[in-house]
Amino acid sequence: MARLGFKLVGGGAQLDLDKPRFDAAVQAFGRQLLGADVGLFYYAGHGIQVRGTNYLVPISANPTREADVDFQMVDVGLVLKQMEGSGTKLNIVMLDACRNNPFGGRGLRAAEGGLAQIRAPEGTLLSYATQPGNVALDGDDGHSPYTRALVETMQKPGLDVLQAFNQVGLIVKRGTGGSQQPWVSSSPIDGSFYFANAAPSAIAAPVVAAAPPAPAKNLPIARSLEQRAMDFAARDMDRSSGDPAAFLAYASQVFDDQVDFYGKRTSRTDVLKEKERFVARWPIRSYRLLPDATRASCTEDQARCLVSGVVVFSVSDPAKGRKSAGTATFEYGVSFATGTVKVFSENGKTLSAQR
């Protein structure tokens, strides 16, 4: 990876990590991402999914019951959070971790083979060694078919990132007689990135793996503020549709200290109280953007945008027999000036509703 132009966390491959060292490596990765154009996280080793959540397995993990998992393993979502708030233009996650459950029947009845599919955050490409829910091969020479294909492909000039991973998939599929097919999940990527071409400021964190060699550099990609604002709106609607506790945790991070909240200057604390009241009234919520109606206007010098549009919503409280569905407008004021998204205004109104 270093010869590809990436700066490695800790100066080299992070091998055979126990849980404390694994956590420290992920945190260091997040800190060093700030100011980078491209972030890359590569992991090879055991990985399991428990109730739809993917976990990477440190060498010290020895769970005897499902409740041990959060304390002894590393949630892949924590890696994505480090990348999401970094301000990078592109994030790449490569998981050669689709192995059999190494803990057998030791109380992990909810553990399933392979990894679950992850929804790619804004500007992120996730590459799995095999299809979600399937088990990948280890290989017979210390490197898996997936890693060998990465080594072969990443050093080829002229392949953009999507072409490179497509080539990796074809090599693995053919080399395993079709029994293993790598899988890619990606959000829209604005611009082009090449492993083997000119170099940007980039950082990679190879964790529990050998880093593939290649004499190449990288090309930075541009992402307009308008597109970032619209991507944020789409991601916000997804978060707003989720579990109430997860949504409130997200809201506590994304709002600025003071918010123009439906025409009134409001502290973040009071905004969060209003959000808590809303999810208490409507514990089940679903929001879907109308893509053609979403617009954004930005001031480049201040890195601030107004993004607005129309959303189709459905909210309910089954316990109390309440429900409502319809359409509404929304408008967010968002700032990218600090490298993380902050909402400084929120407004909107209901267009139609049926109860």
Image: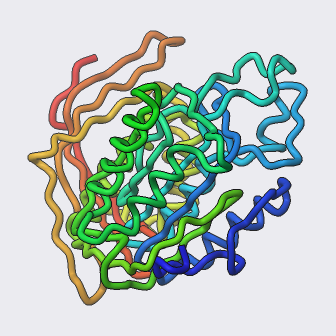
Asked whether 217 or 304 is in front, the reply is: 217
The residue that appears at 79% across and 49% down in the rendered structure is: 58
User: In the displayed image of the protein, which residue is found farthest to the front?
Assistant: 141
Q: Is residue 134 left or right of residue 124?
A: right
Seen in the picture, residue 74 relative to 201 is either above or below; the reply is above
Residue 257 percent location from the top left of the image: 52, 71
The residue that appears at 86% across and 21% down in the rendered structure is: 106
User: In the displayed image of the protein, which residue is found farthest to the left?
Assistant: 292
Residue 133 percent location from the top left of the image: 52, 26
Residue 147 percent location from the top left of the image: 53, 52
Asked whether 219 or 224 is in front, the reply is: 219
Q: Is residue 230 left or right of residue 149?
A: left
Asked whether 73 or 103 is in front, the reply is: 103
Give the quarter of the image for residue 286. top left
Residue 46 percent location from the top left of the image: 70, 40
Asked whether 274 or 244 is in front, the reply is: 244
Seen in the picture, residue 293 relative to 116 is either above or below; the reply is below
The residue that appears at 17% across and 44% down in the rendered structure is: 310
Q: Is residue 281 left or right of residue 90?
A: right
Report if residue 344 is visible in the image.
no
Seen in the picture, residue 130 relative to 193 is either above or below; the reply is above
The residue that appears at 71% across and 57% down in the rendered structure is: 208
Q: Is residue 49 left or right of residue 337?
A: right
Give the image's coloring scheme.
Answer: rainbow
Report if residue 329 is visible in the image.
yes
For the C terminus, give its image quadrant.
top left
Count the numbered circles shown: 0
Give the quarter of the image for residue 115. top right
